[in-house]
Amino acid sequence: MKNKKMKIARIEKDLSQEQLAELIGVTRQTVSMIEAGKFNPSLQLCLAICKALGKTLDELFWPEEE
């Protein structure tokens, strides 16, 4: 499942994948894989992403109800 909410939040903050990766201490490839839904980040990494993007866990990582 792609993480479109994370990608949109990153773009709204005017951050590249590289810039976000630097803020949270991972590689650009890790950010890319999370956005593509190919990597399941740890809770610690999710919290770092939320802090960097000014969002909550629910806003970025809770699945949409269908």
Image (spheres, helix red, strand yellow):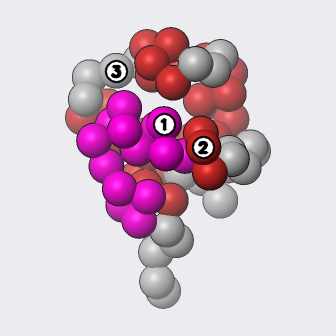
Q: How far apart are marks 1 and 3 (CA)?
A: 15 Å
> Could one spot residue 36 in this view of the protein?
no
**In the depicted structure, whether residue 10 falls above or below residue 26:** below
Position in image of residue 62 (x %, y %): 49, 68
Q: Is the magenta stretch mostly helix, strand or loop?
A: helix
**Could you say which disc has been placed on residue 62 in the image?**
none
Viewer-nearest residue: 43 or 38: 43
Q: Is mark 2 on a helix, strand or loop?
A: helix
Q: What element carries label 1?
A: helix
Of pointers 2 and 3, the one earlier in the residue sequence: 3
Position in image of residue 36 (x %, y %): 64, 42
Q: Are marks 2 and 1 in contact (CB under 8 Å)?
A: yes
Residue that appears at 50% across and 13% down: 22
Query: At label 2, which amino acid type do we have?
Result: Gln
Q: Are marks 1 and 3 in contact (CB under 8 Å)?
A: no
Q: Is mark 3 on a helix, strand or loop?
A: loop
Position in image of residue 25 (x %, y %): 58, 19
Label 2: how many residues lie within 10 Å, few (<14), some (14-19) or many (20+)? few
The residue labelled by disc 3 is 15
The residue labelled by disc 1 is 48
Query: Is label 2 or label 3 in front?
Result: 2
> Could one spot residue 59 in this view of the protein?
yes
